Amino acid sequence: MALNGPLDRPSRLHPALSTRQGFALAEEAGSVQNLLRDTVDAIRNLRMVSLHGDAVFTLGSIGVEKTMKIMLGCDEVETSGSWPTKKTLQHDWGHDIHVLNELLGSAIAGGLTRSTHIAYAETLADRITASTALPLLFATFARYGKSGRFHYLDVLATDDPGLEDPPAEYWERLESSIRSSEPQFREMPYGDNQALDEYAARLRNRIADELEAWWFCIHRLGVQGCFGELGKTIGSAIWEPGRPEPRVMRTGAR
């Protein structure tokens, strides 16, 4: 790359990036921080999926996709010496959070040995892979991010229900899984509106806790060096300053 001006010079973040790229990456890391913070809050405040689901799905699908792509980008810089091309980002990686999550899992597995504290990094990686809620949450975000945000526009245009369910049904599968698998959620307090509202709040907090724990684990894996030297800086930048370690990380709850 020809260095023709101040923005073309190597970035202080990493010599493989130009100053312009460094600025862009810092902005994206800040965006991830904002989006994941707001997604966690939106899930905690979710009362009716028909009223508030679009905010959760929009924030979550964008925030999770960006997180995965910038950490994969840091890993690519470490392994190949350059940031992924636009073709890689748009076409090879795409917008399918399922695909991105598989790529991220491979990057984490391959980067554990270069972590500062390997045993700690392995604990973080195990926390992610042991979660039964995350795959269903990511399936909801993936559905919305790929085409679900236009589900009913497509039905309107074609007069056909299509092959895939609306995102709200993906969300219901997530909640149903938690209700059936976790004893504290198996009994719904029917007939008591206040108790039912409190139950729903606990259930949504449980989901928010799981996303917050994933965010924390990716942040700490980055700081540990799992995604390379650039990932140490960006891993730190995606976490909200002053935000404590999630409660579920301290208690070991899932």
Image (spheres, rainbow, N blue to C red):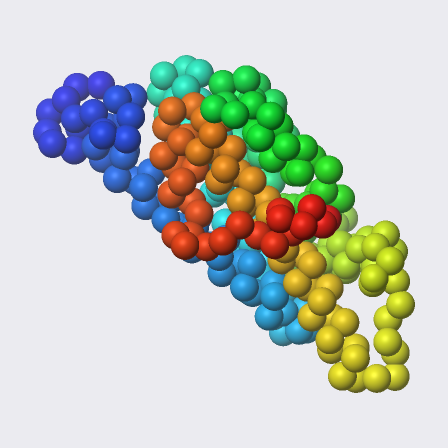
In the image, what residue occupies the spot 83% across and 63% down? 185
Residue 57: % across, % down:
59, 58
Q: Nearer the viewer, residue 184 or 34?
A: 184
In the image, what residue occupies the spot 44% across and 47% down? 239
Residue 180: % across, % down:
87, 56
Number of numbered discs overlaid on the protein picture: 0
Can the viewer see residue 220?
yes
User: Which residue reaches farthest top?
Assistant: 80
Q: Report which quarter residue 159 is drawn in.
A: bottom right
Query: Residue 79, relative to residue 94: is it above or below?
Result: above
Can the viewer see residue 153?
no
In the image, what residue occupies the spot 32% across and 45% down? 27
Q: Nearer the viewer, residue 78 or 9?
A: 78
In the image, what residue occupies the spot 73% across and 64% down? 203
Residue 228: % across, % down:
43, 23
Query: Residue 161, relative to residue 143: is it above or below?
Result: below
Describe residue 168's horizontal placement relative to residue 119 as left or right. Answer: right
Q: Nearer the viewer, residue 191 or 54?
A: 191
Query: Residue 25, relative to residue 239: is it above or below?
Result: above
Q: Report which quarter residue 193 is drawn in.
A: bottom right
Residue 207: % across, % down:
68, 57
Q: Split into 4 quadrants, where in the image is the N terminus?
A: top left
